[in-house]
Every structure is written in structure tokens, then in C-alpha cells.
Image (tube, rainbow, N blue to C red):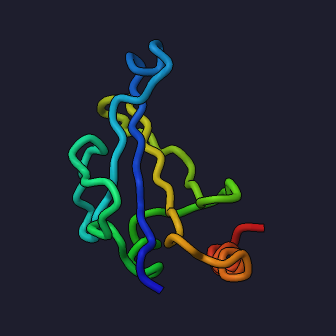
Amino acid sequence: MNGFRVTYEIVTYESAEHGDAESRGFIEPGGWRTPVDEAIAGTELFGMSLREAMRLAYPIEDSGHWWTGEAEQDYRTGAYETRSIHPPEGITPASYARVTRLLGIR
């Protein structure tokens, strides 16, 4: 099933003081980041297989609509990056539950 998307959010100490993230966007296969304001809405540009998505993100939590990993800190800058895997549009509840189990999330 293609169409999974991986997003990122980077929070720095400065952005956290303002209650926001430093940057947000999509991660493409190969690890390339595209900020959300540069992404074209509604395109399948960032869709990938679940296997590709799992290489880019390591989710540990199910939000009910997507799966999110633990924030990882860049010790050089102090920034935290969180990555999430988003399912394809139209995924059935049964398929969502199967992917959740496959990811090892209870």
C-alpha cells in the first residue's frame, strides 16, 4: 500500500518559548526534508510504501489518525525532532489496526 507520508517537526528552545515549532514539513525517501510551506497541497509527491516510511520514522505512539515517534535531540543544537507516519487517505479502520500492530504499538 503506497501513500504513507512521513512528517517532521523540529522544536528549539527559542521556538518552544513562543509555543511553536522551528520548522515542520515532509520527509521524502532518502531523508530529504521539504518544509510544509514549500510542499504542494494535495499531491502524492511524498507518498511512499510503509517499508520506506518505517526506515525514516520509528513510531511508538498511536494518535488514532497517525503514528508518532519519540522526540530525538540533536545535542549540538539542542533542538528536538519528532517524526510521524501518516496513513494513506481512505485507509480502512481494519487496515489501520493491522498497521498499528505491525508497528508494534499496542
- Image quadrant where one finds the C terminus: bottom right
Residue 66 position, x and y percent, is 59, 60
In this view, 60 is above or below 37: below
Q: Quadrant of residue 11?
A: top left
Residue 15 position, x and y percent, is 40, 20
The one nearer the camera, 84 or 47, is 47
> Horizontal placement of 62 versus 56: left or right?
right
Residue projecting furthest to the top: 17
Residue 92 position, x and y percent, is 66, 78
> Horizontal placement of 11 versus 33: left or right?
right
> Horizontal placement of 68 versus 53: left or right?
right
- Say which residue appears at 73% left-offset and 81% top-offset: 94
In this view, 16 is above or below 105: above
- Say which residue appears at 30% left-offset and 33% top-offset: 76
Residue projecting furthest to the bottom: 1
- Say which residue appears at 70% left-offset and 58% top-offset: 64
> Horizontal placement of 71 versus 96: left or right?
left
In this view, 81 is above or below 92: above
Residue 82 position, x and y percent, is 47, 46
In this view, 67 is above or below 99: above
Q: Quadrant of residue 32?
A: bottom left
The one nearer the camera, 8 or 42, is 42
- Say which residue appears at 30% left-offset and 64% top-offset: 43
